[in-house]
Image (cartoon, helix red, strand yellow):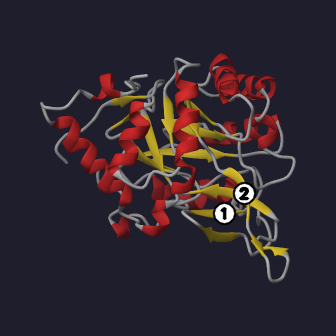
Amino acid sequence: MSETFNISLGRGLTLQNPVLLASGTVSYGEELQALDALDGIGGIVTKAISLEVREGNLPPRMVETSSGVLNAIGLANVGIERFISEKMPALRKMGVKIIVNIVGKSVDDYVEVVKRLDDVEGIDGYEINLSCPNVKGECIIFGVSPTATLEITHALRKVSSRHLMIKLTPNVTSIGAIAQAAEEGGADSVSLINTVVGMAVNYKTQKPVLKNVTGGLSGPAIKPIALAKVWECYQSVKIPIVGMGGIASFEDAMEFLVVGSKALQIGTMNFVQPSIGSEVAQKLSLYFSSAENPDYESYVGSLIV
């Protein structure tokens, strides 16, 4: 690497590079070291963790689409106890920041997961998932309401001094209002966007491809939506924004920075090219270490309109 960044997202979370690997695309990180996927990146966001073990939705629950992927995994995970005993020992050794993605069915669920994790060493922050569209009547019910977002963020702020990153859904009328509620509730940053609700059908069988019928669309197809939502939030809040949604190259990453992302998450492209995060991180480092280019902090949010 040509340069190590010191990008502060607040409350003790400082990244050596703005690139994070997104939740749901890198499992619990076990496979990453063998693939050289951690070189130079800022950190990883773990697969979602809930209070209890979750099997997720019935298959088929993932399908490729034009320029993207639809998934209806349904937040399948090992649960909080196995995560602490089986997954955290390896995560502690990775040498990058570890942000744990958290989901729940109620405010009490989220609070209990954070309480159990708060004494566990090796965790640098929490990404609070209020935005998964693949489970009925659960986390997204918080993420579409400013009042509910404020309530849950405030409740979590009272039980933890670690970094709180609130993950937002694009499937709302005003994402800026949701971001403001998270900020008011005590969030240190917001991450966006989560997947866009989509559907795939088989015209021959006249049936949906996914067992769940609908799923969350991710990948390059959603990048224009993500850029617009990040820009909207940049006008609405003062806390840092972690942008994601279709990032597949250095150029994509730069677009997210210019509309207001202080850090980035790469997701779907990890399935296609496991080294993508490391490659984008290195290119960002080279670009911003050159005296001919603007400095990082002044470039973030520098869109001319």
- Can residue 188 be seen in the rendering of this structure? no
The residue at 35%/30% (across/down) is: 7
Above or below 51: residue 86: below
> Is 279 in front, or is 255?
255
What residue is shown with label 1?
70
The residue at 58%/27% (across/down) is: 232
> Is 198 in front, or is 95?
198
Q: How many marks?
A: 2
Indicate the secondary structure of the residue bearing disc 2: strand
State the image quarter where residue 148 is shown: top right
How far across and how far down the image is residue 225, in percent? 58, 42
How far across and how far down the image is residue 94, in percent? 39, 54
Type of amino acid under label 2: Gly
Q: Residues within 10 Å of mark 1 (few under 14, many from 20)?
A: many
Relative side of 89 to 298, left or right: right
State the image quarter where residue 170 is shown: top right
Quadrant the C terminus occupies: top left
Indicate the secondary structure of the residue bearing disc 1: strand
Real-space CA distance between mark 2 and mark 1, rounded to the nearest whole angstrom: 7 Å
* Callout 2–callout 1 Cβ contact below 8 Å: yes
Relative side of 49 to 105, left or right: left
Q: Residues within 10 Å of mark 2 (few under 14, many from 20)?
A: some
- Can residue 190 be seen in the rendering of this structure? yes
How far across and how far down the image is residue 85, in percent? 60, 58
How far across and how far down the image is residue 76, in percent? 71, 62
Type of amino acid under label 1: Leu
Q: Which residue lies furthest to the left in this view?
A: 291
The disc at residue 130 is none
What residue is shown with label 2?
198
